[in-house]
Image (cartoon, helix red, strand yellow):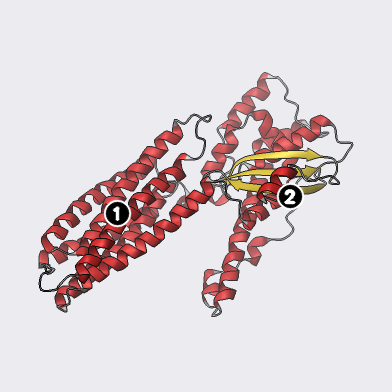
Amino acid sequence: MDVEQAQEWERLSIKRRRSVASLAAGAIPPPAHFYALRMSQEQIAAIRNKSVREFYKHQNEVIDRFEEVDMIIERIRNSPEALNYGSTSTTSSTVSVQNTNTQQNDEESNIETPLLLKPSARNSFENRPSPSWLIHLAINVSMLANVILFITKVVLAILSGSMAILASAFESFLDILSNGIIFFTIRVIRQKNLYDYPARMEPLGIIVFAVVITTSFSQVLISSIERLTEDPSTSEPVDLSPIAVILLAANIIIKGILWLWCLTVKGSSSVQALAQDHENDVIFNIASTIFPVLAVWAKLPWLDPVGAIVLSLYIIYEWVTVLLENIRRLTGQVASVDDIKQLTYMAYRFSTKIVAIETVRAYYNGDRCVVEVDIVLPPECPLREAHDVGEALQDALELLDNVERAFVHLDFTSEHQIEHRRVVDDVGFG
């Protein structure tokens, strides 16, 4: 389990952690060793049939989800709360907190223990999070490099008259803008009022950024089409000096170095996103350099606006896809089948006290899901014990990476009408 999940676990009170741990101690064993069913990337790449290859890729993704559940349950079972509970109580799954000074001291000391890190993360230096100063340095250097490269490309676009370089300059400007939007949304998320806009600022920032990108590159696309359709005798030719070519090559090299460096920084999703952005920039800069160079070398000036058109269409397509995906998630898109499988597997494995899983629903509320699970407990189950089962399952579900909130409904039979029948019939959500 990652650091974020460990922090989620530590936010729970000692009593709730013990309740979750006591119930997870009686979890149903996994039905299979999923890691043994995984196919390596080399094996998948050797498969010629595309459909079969995609099937095994998807199977690996499902296995990853199931292993995440197994890891969460295993780490909870091995947590100090579970060990302390096992040494002090052996009769009931509910947790009774004894008010002794010794036990309180033990509990306080357990709060500082990183419970839910992957086993390899404790023993392997390579998987440890990078120091915070290195993470901040990677972010600041990337920002500075984006500013310098943007200024360089603007000057080159003005001096050479290349539309492809202008498109690349727009892309560099949007890198700066994206960093600013991400910085702003993260600050808002940290200071957010949960009654105003929980969990929605980050996808909203992405939507704003996607709109800016598609609008900007649409203008580049229109200008490139106009350049392509105008009379060649009146159009301004592309003029690339050796210094301009050297600077374009330097842009590619700098972005490549930043990409490889950010890949080595662990423990920050922001830096990993920057690494992905640098990788895309390397590809984009190579393409935006090839087209104007070929246009000058082959004396075919139409290659430059064609290159700008291709690059603009690619960026517009990519970000319209991102835009639509985030709009769907903000409007309550139903979770995928794989999400439902993972949630059902968590409810199935969590406790032997759960007789049946009646319903599992999930829908997006921003980047992550709101989950509703209906479980069946024995009719003779005491209220206090039933409450602890439902609350502990809710806490365990909320440890999953893709879950924002979880709600668990308890029942003693599954022979009744579906809950929220009117809502299900009206919107087709089931």
- Above or below residue 4? Residue 321 is below
Density class for disc 2 (Cα within 10 Å; few <14, some 14-19, many ≥20) is: some
Residue 216 numbered tag: 1
Q: Residue 317 falls in which quadrant of the image?
A: bottom left
Q: Where is residue 202 shown, x and y percent of the image?
A: 45, 43
Which residue appears at 26% of the width and 55% of the height? Answer: 170
Q: Where is residue 285 shown, x and y percent of the image?
A: 27, 63
- Front of the two marks 1 and 2: 1
- Above or below residue 382? Residue 29 is below
Q: Which residue is mark 2?
A: 349
- In depth, the one of 24 and 420 nearer the eye is 420
- In depth, the one of 165 and 186 nearer the eye is 165
Q: Residue 261, can we see it?
A: no
Q: Where is residue 248 shown, x and y percent of the image?
A: 19, 63
Quick one: label 1 or label 2, which is nearer the N terminus? 1
- In depth, the one of 138 and 179 nearer the eye is 179
Which residue appears at 25% of the width and 67% of the height? Answer: 225
Which residue appears at 21% of the width and 70% of the height? Answer: 228
Q: Residue 336, can we see it?
A: yes
Q: Relative to residue 360, is residue 364 drawn left or right?
A: left
- Above or below residue 395? Residue 274 is below
Q: Work out how far the residue at label 1 is from the one at label 2, CA to CA, in angstroms.
A: 50 Å
- What amino acid is found at the position of numbered circle 1 in the picture? Ser
Residue 195 numbered tag: none
Q: Where is residue 172 shown, x and y percent of the image?
A: 27, 54
Which residue appears at 13% of the width and 63% of the height? Answer: 160
Q: Secondary structure at mark 2?
A: helix
Q: Relative to residue 302, is residue 372 drawn left or right?
A: right
- What amino acid is found at the position of numbered circle 2 in the picture? Arg
